[in-house]
Image (tube, rainbow, N blue to C red):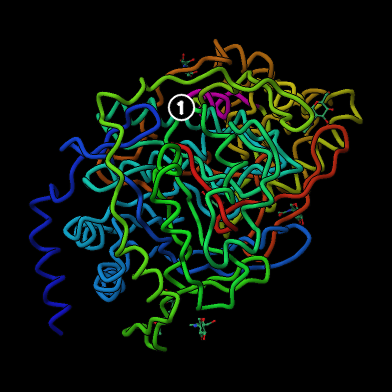
Amino acid sequence: MKLLSFLAAAAAASTTVYGAVQKVTRAGRYMYTADGNRFYVKGIAYQTQGQIVSGPDNPLNQPSTFVDQLADSAGCARDLPFLQQLGVNAIRAYSVDSTLNHDSCMAALSGAGIYVILDLTLPLNGSIDTTLPTWSTNLLDLYIDTINVFSKYDNVLAYNVGNEVLTNGATNAAPFIKAAARDIKAYLASIGSSALVGYADIDGAAAFPRRRLRLPQLRSDEWCGDAATSTYDNLNSEFENYNVVAYFSEFGSENCDPGVRPWTEVGTLFASPMTNIWSGGLAFSYFNASSAGHQFGMATLSADNTTVTTNQDFANLQSQYKSVTFVNTPTQSAAAQSTYGACPQPDANLEASTTLPPTPNDSACACLTEHLGCLFKMPANGDYTALVGTLTGVVCGELLPGVGGSCNDIATNGTTGTYGVVSSCDPVTRLSYAFSQYYDLTSRAATSCDFSGNATTNSVIGNVLAPSAAVSTCLPSPSAVFTPSAPSGASAAASASGSSGSGSNGNGSGGGKTGGAVEVRVGAGMLMTLVAGVLGGVAFTLL
Ligand SMILES: *[C@@H]1O[C@H](CO)[C@@H](O)[C@H](O)[C@H]1NC(C)=O
Ligand SMILES: *[C@@H]1O[C@H](CO)[C@@H](O)[C@H](O)[C@H]1NC(C)=O
Ligand SMILES: *[C@@H]1O[C@H](CO)[C@@H](O)[C@H](O)[C@H]1NC(C)=O
Ligand SMILES: *[C@@H]1O[C@H](CO)[C@@H](O)[C@H](O)[C@H]1NC(C)=O
Ligand SMILES: *[C@@H]1O[C@H](CO)[C@@H](O)[C@H](O)[C@H]1NC(C)=O
Ligand SMILES: *[C@@H]1O[C@H](CO)[C@@H](O)[C@H](O)[C@H]1NC(C)=O
């Protein structure tokens, strides 16, 4: 009871005062608070795990659903004392729903000096896809909607544009992640936000912008116990000359008995020489979570979600975090400039072009939809993601090739840096474009715009252009990079939900549905699987 009233007071107070935490800025590879001290992430992952639907399409066992923890004011009130006992100064949330209200949680956290590292992605179709990546209007709009909701809070430390998208076997999504970081950075600057932009990398992946592969030590048994600095040698050598802020976005050995991790690596992570390179990390995880057969978690909720029981893991982390003294060097003025070295050149381990895709252009995609001859028809239930995926596979894999066409205009290849002129539009627009190409190549026969009842001809016949003419009309400079603006319908302070026509996904960029990812077929009969991401194993993030 005491607890609840304290939080209610904190929440009420901070609706007027959001200035409880200091602003954090980056200088070279380090972060500093406004008072000039070095800032380290001493944090914990804070999100209940969504429902996991395992299967060959979900090799990382990533959840397909999520609960927005930062919209659960009672939950935040319940957990805040435990977060304070742990002594964390940051939490990471993996997915939020921009249509919900986050004032109470954000204010309570801010009042307790706790920053939030927020992933902008959602499960399944709300993320850049590992194997069929695009950086498209629907994702850009999703990210901006979330930023618009969170930009009013003083304690958002960073936004992550991707979580564990790149894997050892699939690095061709790297240019899309970089483009997302580029555009989100530009957007944040345009609204005066100083939040940092990050990407959470998977442990052991060949990844952007890392130069080397495989970090077996990260998963070694040494992590379950006292970690020698040498445990991190490979990782350190990758990052020692890399002028970005880096921290461990999820740490904590998966090789200990559940609930009894000693967390003694904390002492290593927050001491020199690790602090020369790293800015702390986020322990994984406050709530129960399972990953790759391992169990994590420090707080078990009662059946009615009102009380918390902590375990030995919690006590151990608390004791380790308590003994951390931040190394306060170098000084901010001695930190190097915030410059970046040249990006690594593509090779067999980094199949990623240095040519990035353009900034997605909402009005261009809306303009296309106005001018295309044959349009995808929304299913009555609005759940179009899997259907769009299926249909894109059919039209690209069979129909268009059969009449001498191709889906090159909606396809991407991050390895070669080839981006079809329409590929940064949302999946529904891309599908309508492919439908229209087929319609045109079959002389706009009435029967050619049907697709088993999934398509309809453009009712404003006077508007209809050949697909290529629609492209020249709507996309005068298809590779343009520019500062994106908020999607129409979204206000600066609150997000709009329910965009129609755009804001979809499908083949060529995530075509999952709750219940499992789907196989996708794109271009010249290439078969791939879709995975989209939330939780994973041990990882770290670049800001
Ligand atoms: C969380 O994990 C612990 C230890 O594995 C287990 O005892 C507990 O039942 C779990 N709680 C929930 C709600 O799953
Ligand atoms: C407890 O919270 C979880 C999400 O955090 C939710 O899925 C579940 O329905 C809640 N249970 C009750 C009884 O409220
Ligand atoms: C990209 O192009 C290269 C070279 O043509 C090809 O080997 C590769 O399979 C393509 N990747 C995708 C994802 O289409
Ligand atoms: C749309 O396409 C799907 C997949 O091919 C098919 O099952 C369905 O019957 C089609 N028609 C409608 C109206 O959904
Ligand atoms: C975006 O698309 C609109 C509509 O076609 C076009 O007028 C505008 O020039 C495009 N923006 C850029 C930067 O290419
Ligand atoms: C994902 O798909 C659903 C419908 O299937 C849609 O409402 C939502 O906007 C899509 N999200 C994105 C980011 O494309």
From the viewer's perspective, is residue 83 above or below residue 347? below
Total marks placed: 1
Asked if one can make out residue 17 in the rendered structure from this viewpoint, the answer is yes
Q: Residue at x 26, y 31 (%)?
A: 331
Of the 4 image quadrants, the one containing the C terminus is top left
- Tell me the crowding category of disc 1: few under 14, some 14 to 19, or many 20 or more residues within 10 angstroms, Cα based: some
Task: Report the residue marked by disc 1.
Answer: 243
Magenta stretch, residue numbers = 362-372
Name above or below for residue 238 compared with residue 252.
above
Magenta stretch: dominant secondary structure? helix
Residue 184: give x, y in percent of width and height: 42, 32
Indicate the amino acid at tag 1: Asn
Q: Position of residue 295 (x, y in %)?
A: 58, 74
Which of these two is toward me, 398 or 327?
327
Q: Residue at point 37% right, 49% down? A: 117
Q: Is residue 252 above or below residue 428?
A: below
Pick whichever, 319 or 155, lies toward us: 319
Q: Would you say residue 508 is visible in this rendering?
A: no
Q: Does the beta carbon of the residue at mark 1 sit less than 8 Å from ligand 5? A: no
Q: Is residue 222 left or right of residue 186?
A: right
Q: Is residue 366 magenta?
A: yes
User: What residue do we see at 12% from left, 73% from top?
Assistant: 6
Tell me if residue 247 is in the magenta stretch. Answer: no
Residue 9: image location, x then y, percent: 9, 68
Residue 305 or residue 323, whichever sits in front: 323
Quadrant showing the N terminus: bottom left
Q: Quadrant of residue 67?
A: bottom left
Displayed quadrant of residue 438: top right
Q: Residue pushed farthest right?
A: 402
The image quarter containing residue 403 is: top right
